[in-house]
Amino acid sequence: MEKFKFNYTLVMPEHNIVGSSDDMDGSIIELLANEKADIAVAFLPILADARQHILYSTGLDEGEWMMIMIRPLESASGSGLLAPFDRDVWILILVSLLAVGPIIYGLLVIRYYLTKDSEQVRYTLPHCIWFVYGALMKQGSTLSPTGDSTRILFASWWIFITILTSFYTANLTAFLTLSKFTLPINNAEDVRRKEKAFTTIRGNAIEYAIKNSDEALNSLSFLVDKHLVEFTTNLNDSDILMTTVAKKNYVYVRDRPAIEHLVYNDYLVRRKVNPINERSHCPFATATTPFLKRVRAFAYPNSTRWNALFDPQLLNMVEGGLIKFKLLENLPKAEICPQNLGGTERQLKNRDLVMTYLVMLTGFCTSIAVFFSERKLARTQRADDRTQAAPEKITYLSKGVSDSPPPPYAEIFSRHTSGMIGAKGMFGSQIVTDGDAARQMINGRDYMVVKEKNGIGSQLIPMRAPSAAIFQYTYTN
């Protein structure tokens, strides 16, 4: 006005809406289309539908519509136990845990048939599976492969687990130490996927982008049908923040300058009320990813002549940074209420250990279920043994327990000494193999398998000195 020496009269639209072909009544576009105004000095989003009614000026800025919501109590990244790795990494670890055991077993079988190595120990599939699981849990293993190729196979899995657990431990420590924070809703795709209710100003770019079939945000139109989207006519941002967002847990979508001024003003009020507790100053959080981006500009009627005069001056203001300066005027240089509040201390809370509790509960429940399954299986096995064994007496060789105590060692070895030449016994007698007793290697230990006096059943007696002494002491004292 000062430069071009003109006066102006401010004309307000009937409704505070931008307007479109399907929503013209009382809008800014209606004023311009009917030539009731010569220029719209508002940051209007450039919409393809509106070009048939109005003429836009040179672009002033790229408008960004952001989301503000209640700050959640915990990060959306979930429990600390799962945080160190991405979901794909966890899936691949589970796949490798299930696949490596059978692969090792298959390679052992292939090596045995190809080499015909009689000294090779053919481990069973359960042994290979438990080796893989034990290595993951940093436990030892009794498996000792004989072949070099098998040893390299076992060592490769150990090296892989060592590196994997080192990364996990380091990332878990960093996660629990640093106060990194993420929101559950970060963009429009999260809103669509989680069907999150949100509100926005009636008649702005968000509403037209959702209702226009040519726009990407048209994918959110089903939320309108489900009444999860509220196009409010309330122009008081603070009131919307306190009612719709705080009480109804809605997400509020607004253009970035309005959001920044809203958050800053709310911060000043809360800081004045409670200057000590800094955590209470920022109960709301703003997503960092824009919900929608649109170039914004002024607008003229289609028959205007003022664009040739004003557009070069507007372009000079944009290139000189004046537009951006005026948008951010009265705002501090520092970011107000960011996602990460930047606390210097990070104390673990009970919610950080929720996954730990779930793991323990799952483990206890699983062990109880396995325990009852084992009892049921043992009872079934004993019932089958009773039907097959003689009714007078049942002796369980696997348990090493009979209904009567075994005879003393001296009697055992004196009964089985003869002129046959055999190995030296524990008491100087010779160990022979006849119809009553035999020396047998079971689970890597020497046992004397002795028949009972009544001829029914057998008894295991350990041959190692410590075990034999304990065995003899138990039944004689």
Image: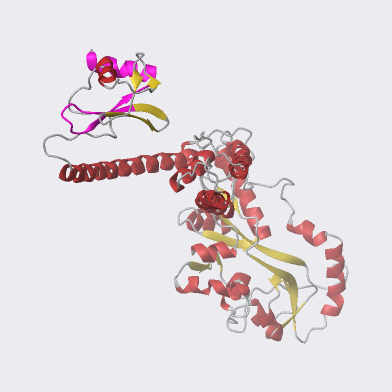
> Is residue 263 found inside the magenta-colored segment of the image?
no
Q: Which of 110 and 54 lies nearest the eye of the viewer?
A: 110
Horizontal placement of 102 versus 66: left or right? left
Note whether residue 35 is visible: no
Displayed quadrant of residue 439? top left
Q: Which of 228 and 323 lies nearest the eye of the viewer?
A: 228
- Residue in the image at 55% along x and 62% along y: 190
Displayed quadrant of residue 472? top left
Say above or below: 46 vs 178: below
Question: Which percent across, then down, holds residue 211?
Answer: 56, 77
Say above or below: 431 vs 355: above
> Is residue 459 found inside the magenta-colored segment of the image?
yes
Say above or below: 293 vs 343: below
Note whether residue 395 is visible: yes
Question: The N terminus lies in which quarter of the figure?
Answer: bottom right
- Residue in the image at 75% along x and 85% along y: 302
Question: The C terminus lies in which quarter of the figure?
Answer: top left
Question: Which percent across, then down, holds residue 359?
Answer: 43, 42
The range drawn in magenta is 448-476
